[in-house]
Image: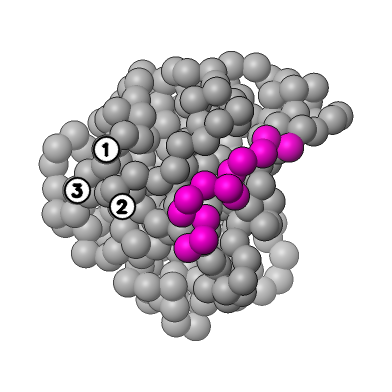
């Protein structure tokens, strides 16, 4: 949903297409040209190598017509005119982006968690850097930025897909980075991590608050990730065998 207009909604499909609604979802318009980008010949989703899909759409909170669109797998592309035209992936951007985050107090900044590693930009996707010190897992799944401090970033990561998605082989962790500091792993703070934990889906809440959802339940931190408590939810049976798909926090 657009942070500028509550009636504007974007959705992505498989094969990769982007659609926009300006009336709250009553009608939809295909924003063409996405799959015509030069890099599209290399897009492919591993389980089904003859197709691909839009994995994530991130509207820019500081530019109403700019969006960042991740195709799984193959490209992170942008539009500066609400899908009239598209800018193809650039050197240094990740090819297997799973999630993205932006922040209203950080114009031009985008944070990404991808299967081929973490990346961030300070110039709206023109160039990308890959801060890695302390982040000893490169299969990144979810990223969240503190609503009150864009210098504080959380990311969930594993060594590979096998260690991320299946409970019987999972070993995933959550890492935090503040400013230009190295990443630190958030072990021993009340959030289940490590063996048997599928990759947490992360979301930011109020300033200083984060949420994490995995096969071990839903957890919340109100101190920037220093400590976590479980939120009591009446889950259905077999939750520990499942993998969380998404998490939304409403104001």
Q: Position of residue 187 (x, y in %)?
A: 27, 59
Q: Quadrant of the C terminus?
A: top right
The secondary structure type at the circle numbered 2 is strand
Q: Name the mark nearer the viewer: 1 or 2.
A: 1
Q: Residue at x 22, y 58 (%)?
A: 135
What is the secondary structure assignment of the residue under circle 3? Answer: loop
Question: Front-most of 52 and 220?
Answer: 52
Foreground of the two, 70 or 84: 84
Q: Which portion, as a residue range, is magenta?
A: 30-42
Check contact, mark 3 vs mark 2: CB within 8 A: yes
8 to the left or right of 244: right
Q: Residue 118, which numbered label?
A: 2
Outermost bottom residue: 168
Question: Mark on residue 131?
Answer: 3
Q: Is residue 226 visible?
A: no
Rendered residue at 44%/18% (across/down): 62
The answer to whether residue 12 shows anywhere in this view is yes
Give the class, few, some or many, for how many residues have Cα within 10 Å of label 2's Cα (few <14, many ≥20).
many
Q: Foreground: 229 or 170?
A: 170
* 205 lies left or right of 248: left
Q: Which residue is mark 1?
A: 127
């Amino acid at each position: 949903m657009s942070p500028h207009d509550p009636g504007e909604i974007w959705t992505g499909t498989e094969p990769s297409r982007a659609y926009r609604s300006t009336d709250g979802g009553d009608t939809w318009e295909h924003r063409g040209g996405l799959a015509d980008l030069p890099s599209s010949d290399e897009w492919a989703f591993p389980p089904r190598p003859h197709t691909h899909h839009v994995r994530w759409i991130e509207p820019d909170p500081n530019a109403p017509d700019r969006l960042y669109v991740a195709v799984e797998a193959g490209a992170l592309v942008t539009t500066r005119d609400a899908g009239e035209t598209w800018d193809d992936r650039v050197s240094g951007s990740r090819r297997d982006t799973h999630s993205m985050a932006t922040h209203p107090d950080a114009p031009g900044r985008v944070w990404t968690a991808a299967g081929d590693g973490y990346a961030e930009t300070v110039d709206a996707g023109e160039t990308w850097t890959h801060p890695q010190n302390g982040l000893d897992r490169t299969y990144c799944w979810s990223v969240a930025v503190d609503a009150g401090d864009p210098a504080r970033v959380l990311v969930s990561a594993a060594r590979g897909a096998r260690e991320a998605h299946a409970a019987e082989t999972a070993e995933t962790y959550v890492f935090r980075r503040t400013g230009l500091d190295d990443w630190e792993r958030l072990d021993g703070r009340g959030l289940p991590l490590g063996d048997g934990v599928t990759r947490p889906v992360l979301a930011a809440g109020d300033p200083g608050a984060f949420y994490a959802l995995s096969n071990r339940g839903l957890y919340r931190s109100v101190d920037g990730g220093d400590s976590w408590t479980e939120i009591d939810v009446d889950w259905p049976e077999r939750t520990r065998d499942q993998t969380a798909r998404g998490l939304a926090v409403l104001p």
